[in-house]
């Protein structure tokens, strides 16, 4: 059902954890509805220098979280905002159709963390 | 890799004894039971013998058994057939919230065709209340359909009491015994039911074959298939003789071994439940603690999701199932768990372990050995924990996950 890349990210997720003094934190999902992703960012000069995630959800949810952290690391905030759920799914060699909403969540969590950072800068 | 199959409520392997009689019907006794010649007579005899075996296994008469393509067809056929024939007497059907979709969706479909439907609630153990049923029956009620044992949580319903109530009120009673067959005694007179469903592949028979018991004199009529006169006009279509013969053999063996196997499985199940509850924190047993199938253990693991547990277990060779939304394809967790009042977030962490002939006490050790680190790993990745309290309401608009959000 899942591609090898998805299984790899599920088995060996990159960047799991929390950042205590994060510059931005994004939380999406809802425990009632099922899936929750939380992304922590460390930002220096508008560049994402560190990123960590915590996820409650299926194999695809965990794999997309892991993938989005890898893709965002080292990117400027504007570049990171251009990462879409489509690009996350593609980087994982695709997701089963009924799982596309999981990748949706990963990009949303990243964008929410960036928004949170920018909010704080104001 | 070691493989431990703990998903016997989903399906079972076909027993070698069953394969043997089945093969014989594919190659030697291949005749069409409706044919007059020697080959046809062999097929007919095989069919008759199988009917007798199935009838004996549930305390019925052979002529009260109709073979079908499985549990789903038998459920459809029972409910639809009673509804069609009794429309002039009433249009009210009663069922429960924890039925298999084969029953629930059939009843709901009739609800769109002029029938009135009552779906009885269940308590936190998944149990239907006899009192609720008594209160739900009206003079328009023509059928009550409530399952014998639940596939997701293993709870065994008080069918005998409910069927007696139905009988006193002159209402027909159907029960889906797909999960109870071969695990606990299933006897149509003991239970007092008018119609009863069984399926081959849950009792070490093949998939695609089942049977409907219809008590003699029951106001039921064939209403779904149009075709030949097979099964005494009750189910058209050339009989699936190999499957039916296999079902007969599977029923015979299931009943022969029931007592011994039930004791053995109860021992393994109780060890499994005890060890899970002892060795893993924040787990709840789902279903009734004692009135449950001897092979059935089901849990909700807090803060983690079912599919990610199943994937992790599969990597260790352990096969199980879950009622999580992420495994259902519908983005909704199991209707059974929700009906029991289990909150969505907990239902997502459900795991069902159903034991069978091939399981041993050592399998429990292997399961625990592997499950403890799986739960630990997934919990370390989860943003939820006993102290997590999120304010999600402002995020709610972004949540595209489920249509059933109650916030
Ligand atoms: C309680 C119950 N009823 C009906 C069915 C359907 O049986 P079948 O797969 O033979 O159509 C199942 C099996 O999934 C079941 O567990
Ligand atoms: S997290 Fe539920 S389907 Fe992916």
Image: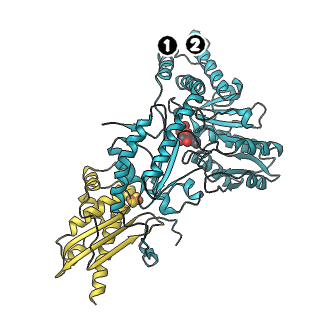
Residue B219 image offset from top left, x and y in percent? 77, 37
Q: Which mark identifies residue B42?
A: 2
Where's the N terminus of chain B, which quadrant?
A: top left
| Residue at x 67% of width, y 26% of height | B55
Say yes or no: labels 1 and 2 on the same chain.
Answer: yes
Q: Secondary structure at mark 2?
A: helix
Does residue B25 appear in the picture of this structure? yes
Query: Is B64 left or right of B355, judged from the image as shown?
Result: right
Q: Which mark identifies residue A100?
A: none
In this orientation, which residue lies closer to the viewer: B57 or A79? B57
Residue B364 image offset from top left, x and y in percent? 43, 40
In the figure, residue B362 lies in which quadrant? top left
- Assess disc 1: are there few (<14), some (14-19) or many (≥20) residues with their C-alpha within 10 Å of its C-alpha: few
Letter of the yellow chain: A
Letter of the cyan chain: B
Could you give the CA–CA distance between mark 1 and mark 2, rounded to whole angstroms?
9 Å
> Mark 2 and mark 1 in contact (Cβ < 8 Å)?
yes
User: For mark 1, what is the residue?
Assistant: B28
Does residue B9 appear in the picture of this structure? no
- Assess disc 2: are there few (<14), some (14-19) or many (≥20) residues with their C-alpha within 10 Å of its C-alpha: some
Tell which circle, 1 or 2, labels the residue nearer the N-terminal end: 1
| Relative vertical location of residue B70 with respect to residue B35 in this rendering, above or below | below
In this orientation, which residue lies closer to the viewer: B301 or A67? B301
| Residue at x 64% of width, y 53% of height | B108
Q: Secondary structure at mark 1?
A: loop
Residue B228 image offset from top left, x and y in percent? 63, 27
List the single residue furthest toward the top: B38
Query: Is B63 left or right of B398, judged from the image as shown?
Result: right
Chain letter belonging to callout 2: B
């Amino acid at each position: 059902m899942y591609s090898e890349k998805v299984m790899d990210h599920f088995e060996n997720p990159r960047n799991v954890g929390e950042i205590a003094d994060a510059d931005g934190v994004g939380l999406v999902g809802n425990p009632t509805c099922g899936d929750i992703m939380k992304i922590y960012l460390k930002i220096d000069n508008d560049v994402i220098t560190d990123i960590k995630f915590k996820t409650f959800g299926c194999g695809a949810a965990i794999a997309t979280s892991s993938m989005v952290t890898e893709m965002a690391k080292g990117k400027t905030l504007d570049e990171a905002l251009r990462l879409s759920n489509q690009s996350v799914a593609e980087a994982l060699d695709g997701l089963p159709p009924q799982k596309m909403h999981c990748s949706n969540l990963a990009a949303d969590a990243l964008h929410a963390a960036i928004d949170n950072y920018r909010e704080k800068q104001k | 890799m070691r493989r431990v199959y703990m998903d016997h409520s989903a399906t079972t392997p076909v027993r070698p004894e069953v394969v043997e009689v089945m093969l014989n019907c594919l190659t030697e006794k291949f005749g069409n039971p409706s044919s007059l010649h020697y080959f046809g007579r062999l097929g007919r005899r095989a069919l008759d013998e199988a009917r007798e075996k199935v009838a004996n296994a549930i305390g019925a008469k052979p002529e009260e058994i109709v073979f079908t393509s499985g549990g789903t067809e038998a459920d459809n056929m029972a409910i639809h057939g009673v509804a069609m024939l009794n429309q002039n007497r009433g249009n009210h059907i009663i069922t429960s919230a924890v039925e298999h979709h084969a029953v629930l969706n059939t009843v709901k479909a009739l609800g769109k065709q002029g029938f009135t439907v009552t779906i009885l609630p269940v308590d936190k153990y998944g149990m239907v209340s006899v009192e609720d049923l008594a209160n739900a029956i009206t003079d328009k009620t023509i059928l009550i359909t409530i399952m014998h044992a639940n596939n997701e949580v293993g709870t065994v319903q008080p069918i005998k009491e409910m069927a007696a109530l139905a009988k006193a009120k002159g209402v027909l009673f159907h029960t889906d015994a797909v999960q109870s067959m071969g695990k606990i005694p299933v006897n149509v007179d003991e239970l007092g039911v008018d119609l009863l469903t069984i399926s081959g592949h849950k009792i070490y028979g093949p998939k695609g074959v089942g049977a409907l018991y219809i008590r003699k004199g029951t106001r039921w009529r064939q209403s779904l298939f149009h075709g030949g006169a097979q099964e005494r006009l009750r189910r058209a279509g050339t009989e699936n003789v190999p499957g039916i013969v296999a079902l007969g053999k599977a029923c015979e063996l299931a009943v022969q071994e029931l007592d011994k196997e039930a004791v053995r499985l109860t021992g393994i199940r109780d060890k499994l439940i005890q060890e899970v509850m002892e060795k893993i924190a924040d787990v709840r047993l789902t279903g009734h603690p004692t009135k449950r199938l001897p092979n059935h253990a089901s849990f909700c693991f807090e803060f983690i999701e079912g599919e990610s547990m199943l994937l992790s277990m599969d990597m260790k060779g352990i096969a199980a199932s879950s009622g999580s939304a992420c495994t259902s394809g519908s983005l909704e967790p199991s209707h059974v768990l929700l009906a029991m009042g289990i909150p969505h977030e907990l239902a997502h962490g459900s795991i069902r372990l159903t034991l069978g002939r091939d399981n041993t006490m050592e399998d429990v050790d292997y399961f625990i050995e592997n499950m403890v680190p799986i739960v630990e790993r997934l919990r370390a990745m989860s943003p939820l924990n006993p102290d997590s309290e999120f304010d999600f309401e402002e995020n709610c608009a972004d949540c595209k996950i489920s249509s059933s959000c109650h916030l």
